[in-house]
Image (cartoon, rainbow, N blue to C red):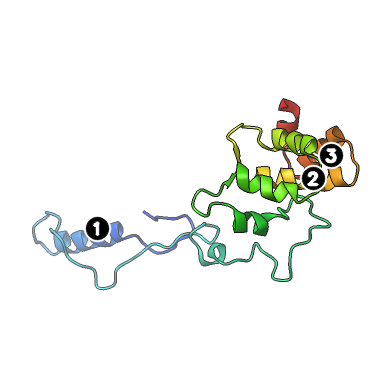
Amino acid sequence: MQKFPTDSRKSADIGLEEVFEERSSSGRSSEKPAHRPLETPIVPYPPPYSAMSAAASSSSARNPFGEDTEHNPGILRYRVLFDDVSDPHRKMLAAEGAREILSQSGLANERLRDVWNIADWDMRGELDQVQFEVAMRLCERLKNKEALDLAKRQVFAELGLLNRFNSH
């Protein structure tokens, strides 16, 4: 029995069955041997498309020349900033930290309150990375004098969160 469909080698179980067949054909006892270590252990390897393969562990998903944010608006542009200011273990940004960063946008407190209410859609009082991205992009658009509803719709569409937009 093969362990993986792309593995052409026999499994260790088959190797032991061959030992059993050799002993039974030579007139010895027909019982399976208790344990006989194989000369070369047979270890099945994962198929090439597996997450365990070497190709999947490399960083080929990231372009070494930078990310194309102009043609891919779904990229988290504020990821580095979030990593710098968030709790590294919980991957969350507390309300106080978010207040410091969002207030640097220069928007009035009433607008920032609206941004917070949109971004903190689960009302935890803290932001995860995607919620932080939403808040920062909303601040960008509001600084450019866009209407809040239009900015919200566009930010949620860019990030693939239209289901969130429709629920709020």
Identify the residue under disc 1: 17
Q: Amino acid at mark 2?
A: Cys
Q: Which secondary structure, mark 3?
A: helix
- Does residue 40 lie above or below 144 as drawn? below
Disc nearest the viewer among 1 and 3: 3
Question: At x 70% / y 54%, what residue is drawn?
Answer: 78
Residue 10: give x, y in percent of width and height. 36, 62
Identify the residue under disc 2: 139
Q: CA distance from mark 1 to mark 2?
A: 68 Å
Tell which of 62 and 90 is nearer to you. Answer: 90
Q: Amino acid at mark 3?
A: Ala
Q: Amino acid at mark 1?
A: Glu
Tell which of 100 and 26 is nearer to you. Answer: 100
Question: At x 15% / y 55%, what residue is drawn?
Answer: 32
Residue 118: give x, y in percent of width and height. 72, 34
Identify the residue under disc 3: 151
Q: Across the whole image, how many numbered discs are drawn on residues?
A: 3
Q: Which secondary structure, mark 1?
A: helix
